[in-house]
Amino acid sequence: MGVLVVPIESVHGQANIRHVGDGIWWSVTTMTGVGFGDVYPVTAMGRVIGMVLEVCGVIVFGLIAGQIAVALFRIQDDFNWKRLFERMDGIEQRLDRMEKKQEFVVKDKAVSD
């Protein structure tokens, strides 16, 4: 978009986006939401391109933030599930020991009777 805006803006006499470098600088600062204001479009079509870049910037950075949040949630969820299964394994081991102890006590009592 930064390259496309140069020919559109350069036809205007008071345009300050005259070179590809200026166009790329303007598109990056517009898309990231920085918008220094040192370079800006003056034509209607250039401003439409600017609006599209602003919306795309919000969408792109929103998607990135969403993906990071999902990844962090997934890591936390995996940790919680792992911890739950470890606790359940521990409970099963304790139950096995209790059953063996109970069987020993019952057998020992039967032998002594």
Image (spheres, rainbow, N blue to C red):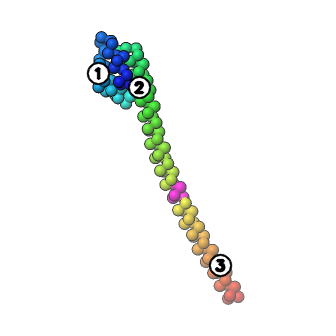
Is residue 86 in the magenta section? no
State the residue position of label 3. 103
Q: CA distance from mark 1 to mark 2?
A: 18 Å
Magenta span: 80-84
* Viewport quadrant of the N terminus: top left
Give the main secondary structure, helix, strand or loop, of the magenta stretch. helix
Tell us which disc is closer to us: 3 or 1: 1
Mark 1 residue type: His
Mark 2 residue type: Leu
Residue 44 placement (x, y as % from top left): 40, 14
- Mark 1 or mark 3, which is nearer the start of the sequence? 1
Tell me which residue sits at (39%, 18%) in the image: 47
Q: Work out whether residue 4 or residue 62 is closer to the camera in this orientation and state it.
A: 4
Tell us which disc is closer to us: 3 or 2: 2
State the residue position of label 2. 53
**Crowd class of label 1 (few under 14; some 14 to 19; many from 20; radius 10 Å):** some
Tell us which disc is closer to us: 1 or 2: 1
Tell me which residue sits at (53%, 62%) in the image: 86
